[in-house]
Structures are given as C-alpha cells and as structure tokens.
Amino acid sequence: METHGWYAWVNRTLSGSASFHLHGLVSAPTPGYAAELRAVETQDSDPDELVFELRLRELPGSWPDVEMPIVVRHDRHPYKGHCAGVLVRVADADTVWIPVAQVR
C-alpha cells in the first residue's frame, strides 16, 4: 500500500480553542476499497507524538483494475493536547512520520 501527500496541523484560534487535522492519500489497487485512520493509544510512544494505524478494507462487489487514490483524514474538535509529530503505521509497509504545523 503506497501513501503520499500527508499533512498534519493544529489550528489554534485566538479564543484559545484548538482542532487537530491529519490528511493523506492512499493508492488503492481498485475503487473497491475504503481506507481508515485509527488512533492508537500506546504507553511506549513519545508524549509529543500521536500514533495512527492506517487500514485498507476491501468492499464487496466487482471492481475494475484501476488504481484509485483514496483521501484519508482524521479530525479532532476540540483538541487540548500538544503534538510535534504524527506516526502513521501502514500495513505491510514502513511507518510514516509527519511533522505537525501550528497554525492560527
């Protein structure tokens, strides 16, 4: 499974509220797949790092053999933590580390 185009950011408003966002693209072998990001709670991870697992699930039915990009995203509203980076675990592939931008 190939992934690309990752971007993560925390949007902090002047009022003090914040939201976290993680977006990326997954190249699926056909349009008959769905992708999902799941937050992983681990005790051994860096407290300044969020960890996610990327899962690709095959949908029922018959699909043409055409590679299809799938947008994956995770959004948290409100977000009260601090995060310098995101680690995405990709099945059958290396992990991807994404720096987190702080925006206002």
Image (cartoon, helix red, strand yellow):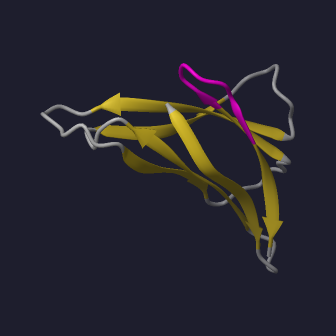
Q: Is residue 94 left or right of residue 12?
A: left
Q: Quadrant of residue 78?
A: bottom right
Extent of the magenta region:
89-97
Q: Quadrant of residue 79?
A: bottom right
Q: Quadrant of the C terminus?
A: bottom right
Residue 14 place in picture, x, y as percent:
82, 80
State yes or no: residue 70 in magenta: no
Q: Residue at x 54, y 23 (%)?
A: 91
Q: Residue at x 59, y 23 (%)?
A: 93
State yes or no: residue 90 in magenta: yes
Q: Viewer-proximal residue, 27 or 24?
A: 27
Residue lying furthest left: 62
Q: Quadrant of residue 29?
A: top left
Residue 70 place in picture, x, y as percent:
42, 48
Q: Residue at x 59, y 46 (%)?
A: 4
Residue 88 place in picture, x, y as percent:
65, 35
Q: Residue at x 42, y 49 (%)?
A: 69
Q: Is residue 44 left or right of residue 54?
A: right
Q: Viewer-proximal residue, 89 or 25?
A: 25
Q: Viewer-proximal residue, 4 or 57?
A: 4
Q: Is residue 93 above or below residue 73?
A: above
Residue lying furthest bottom: 14
Residue 61 place in picture, x, y as percent:
13, 33
Q: Is residue 80 left or right of residue 39?
A: right
